[in-house]
Amino acid sequence: MYSETTNAAARYLASARLDRVRLESLGSELTPGNELSAYVVQDALHERLSEAGAGAVSGHKIGCTTLIMQSYLGIDTPCAGGVFEPTERRRDGVFSFDELLHPGVECELAVRLGADLIPDDAPFDAVSVADAVEAVTPAIEIVDDRWVDYKAIDTPSLIADDFFGAGCVLGDDAQNWRELDLSDVEGSMTINGELVGSGKGSAILDQPLSALAWLANLMAQRGKSLRAGEFVLLGSLVETKWVERGDLVEIDLGSLGRATAHFV
C-alpha cells in the first residue's frame, strides 16, 4: 500500500515515538517531498503505532490556524495530525510527565461530529460543515516536542509526525452551541493559577468552523472522510506553553465550559 520510502519514514518515526527518543531530522532520504506526501507518511505511522499498542485514532488536531501560532512556529498554513484514543481525557486530565519528551499545552475549541463529512460533498465551507457538528467543547491540546530543534525541521516532517500532537483533554460537550457566535467565544489559560494567555474564537481563521472545513477539504482531497463520533481540535487561541512536572493547567471558555490538565 505504501512506498518503500514511506514505510521507512513511518518505521523511523514510530520507533522514536515508542522509545521516547528525540530526533534531529528525518534525513534527506526520508523527508517527504511535500505536505500531501507527509500525510501519507502520517497514515503509515498511525498504522504502525496502532499495531504497537497505541490504540486507534479517535480524533484530529489542526495546528497553525491562528496568527499567533503561525508566527510562533513560522508556518503560514494549517497542519493536521491524529489523536490516539488512549491519550484522550475528559474534563480533568492527568498525564505522566515522564511519558512525554517536552510537553506543552494549548487552549482550544473542539467540535464533535454527529455526521460524516465525505468527499462526495466537498468542497466544504464554514456553513456547510455546521450541520455535521453535534457539539462544541473546550479543549486542552497536549503537544510534545519530539525534535532536538523543531525550529530547524521542515513542515512536511512535522506533519508526518502528527505536528506535535500528543493528546488532549475535552471538556463537557455543549449541545446548545448554535445559540452562540463561536467567533465571539473568549478563552483563557492559566498554569498553576497564573494567566498565561487568552484569545477569541475569531482568531481561528476568522470563524472556527472554517478550520473544520479546511480539514474536511484536505481529507476529501485525499479520498478520506471525517466520521461521526470523531472530534477535531480547531487550533490554539494562545501561544504554546511548555510545562513542568506538577503543573496544573486550566482553560476557561466562558459559556462553553472549562477543562484541566495535571502533569504528574
Image (cartoon, helix red, strand yellow):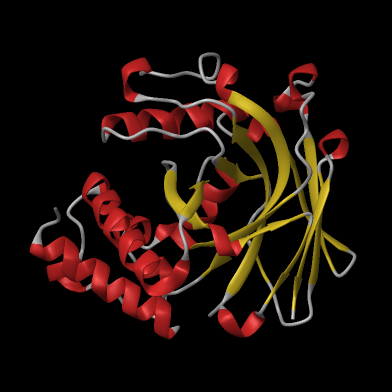
The residue sitting at 25% across, 57% down in the picture is: 41
- In the image: residue 94, left or right of residue 15: right
Res. 206 image quadrant: top right
Quick one: 85 or 43, which is closer to the camera? 85
Residue 206 appears in the figure: no
Point out residue 126 in the picture as x, y percentages from the top left corner: 54, 19
Residue 223 locus on image (x, y percent)? 26, 32
Which of 236/166 is in front?
Answer: 166
Residue at 33% x, 24% y: name it: 119
Q: How many marks?
A: 0
254 vs 104: above or below: above
Does residue 260 appear left or right of residue 18 in this picture?
right
Residue 180, quarter of the rendered image: top right
Query: As drawn, which residue projects farthest toward the right?
Result: 193
Pick the front one: 247 or 237: 247
Q: Is residue 161 visible?
A: yes
Residue in the picture at 63% in, 36% down: 111
Task: Tell me which corner region of the image, top left, top right, bottom left or bottom right, holds residue 204.
Answer: top right
